């Protein structure tokens, strides 16, 4: 589904959700409690479910894939209550495994939809935000770990503010980076010494590159689209049809 054809309600939700998540992350960091971010994110995803009820699947039912994604949301909230350690790491890996399962279910039962892809992507973003903030608050990693956790929301908000348009679907490269990021975050939650810290720093840089790559790719498409629209408007304008030759003659003279 083209990002420009996203329902207006969903686009507005993305803007307000991204802003709310950034503010809640700041509040959670100041309070030293990641649970505020997890609860706020889950409640916002419930709002997305309600807004998109008519677009869950082609049959307008929730579907098995979206139901699995909803289970993933519950597990992400649970992570906020579990102390950093092997148990929390295993819950994170379970959420990642279910991410692969819900995609397979959607393809196998032919219930894939634009809403399902959006719901899945926002659940992924909430997982990363909660785990990154948890690692930072509990001192497992430095404050720099907030960058991959909050970059997705800053990116989505920036696109709406700078380019006044919805974001494009996640690229295949972005999916690979997400999987590697979650695996490294699970290593840090465990933690697996001494490799978890340098791996998390490396994947943070990779995540920044991935979002920068997507941003400039979208900016290029937006720029070329705007130029094409401007040329089309000039070609259709009465002035260009009636006076273009005269103006061209005067300028050449």
Image (cartoon, grey):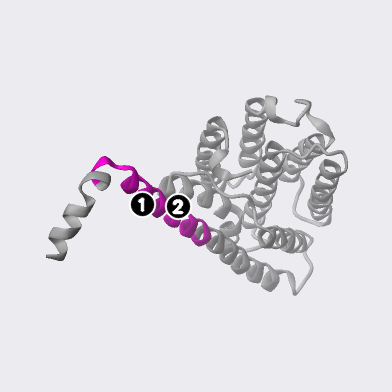
| Residue 221 in magenta stretch | yes
Q: Is residue 61 above or below residue 180?
A: above
> Which element carries disc 1, helix, strand or loop?
helix
Q: Position of residue 33 (x, y in %)?
A: 62, 44
> Which element carries disc 2, helix, strand or loop?
helix
How many other residues sit within 10 Å of disc 1, few (<14), some (14-19) or many (≥20)? Answer: few
Q: Is residue 144 above or below residue 66?
A: below
Q: Quadrant of residue 58?
A: top right
Q: Position of residue 136 (x, y in %)?
A: 62, 57
Question: Disc 1 versus disc 2: distance between alpha carbons?
Answer: 10 Å
Q: Position of residue 39 (x, y in %)?
A: 65, 36
Q: Residue placed farthest to the right in the image?
A: 108
Asked whether the beta carbons under mark 1 and mark 2 sit within 8 Å of each other, the answer is no
Residue 66 or residue 1, whichever sits in front: 1
Q: Is residue 88 left or right of residue 166?
A: right
In the picture, the quarter occupied by the C terminus is bottom left
In the picture, the quarter occupied by the N terminus is top right
Residue range of the region highlighted in magenta in the rendering: 216-239
Report the residue at 58% width, 52% height from top: 152
Report the residue at 68% width, 52% height from top: 131
Residue 75 or residue 253, whichever sits in front: 253
Disc number at residue 55?
A: none
Q: Position of residue 48 (x, y in %)?
A: 63, 31
Disc 2 marks which residue? 225
How many other residues sit within 10 Å of disc 2, few (<14), some (14-19) or many (≥20)? Answer: few
| Magenta segment main secondary structure | helix
Disc 1 marks which residue? 231
Q: Is residue 28 above or below residue 171?
A: above
Which of pointers 1 and 2 indicates the residue nearer the eye? Answer: 1
| Residue 47 in magenta stretch | no
Report the residue at 79% width, 68% height from top: 192
């Amino acid at each position: 589904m083209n990002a420009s054809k996203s329902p207006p309600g969903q686009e507005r939700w993305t803007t307000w959700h991204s802003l709310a998540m950034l503010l809640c992350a700041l509040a959670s960091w100041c309070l030293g409690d990641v649970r505020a971010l997890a609860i706020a994110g889950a409640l916002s995803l419930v709002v997305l479910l309600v807004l998109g009820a008519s677009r869950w699947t082609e049959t307008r039912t929730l579907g098995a894939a979206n139901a699995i994604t909803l289970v993933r949301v519950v597990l992400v909230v649970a992570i906020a209550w579990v102390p950093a350690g092997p148990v929390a790491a295993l819950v994170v890996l379970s959420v990642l495994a279910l991410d692969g399962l819900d995609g397979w279910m959607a393809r196998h039962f032919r219930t894939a939809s634009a809403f399902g892809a959006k719901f899945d992507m926002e659940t992924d973003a909430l997982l990363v935000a909660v785990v990154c903030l948890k690692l930072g608050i509990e001192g497992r990693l430095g404050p720099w770990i907030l960058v991959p956790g909050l970059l997705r929301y800053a990116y989505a908000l920036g696109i709406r503010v700078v380019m006044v348009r919805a974001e494009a679907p996640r690229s295949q490269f972005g999916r690979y980076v997400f999987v590697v990021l979650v695996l490294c975050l699970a290593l840090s939650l465990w933690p697996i010494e001494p490799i978890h810290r340098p791996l998390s720093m490396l994947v943070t840089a990779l995540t920044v590159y991935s979002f920068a790559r997507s941003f400039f790719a979208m900016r290029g498409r937006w720029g070329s689209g705007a130029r094409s629209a401007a040329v089309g408007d000039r070609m259709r304008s009465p002035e260009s049809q009636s006076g273009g030759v005269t103006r061209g003659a005067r300028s050449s003279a």
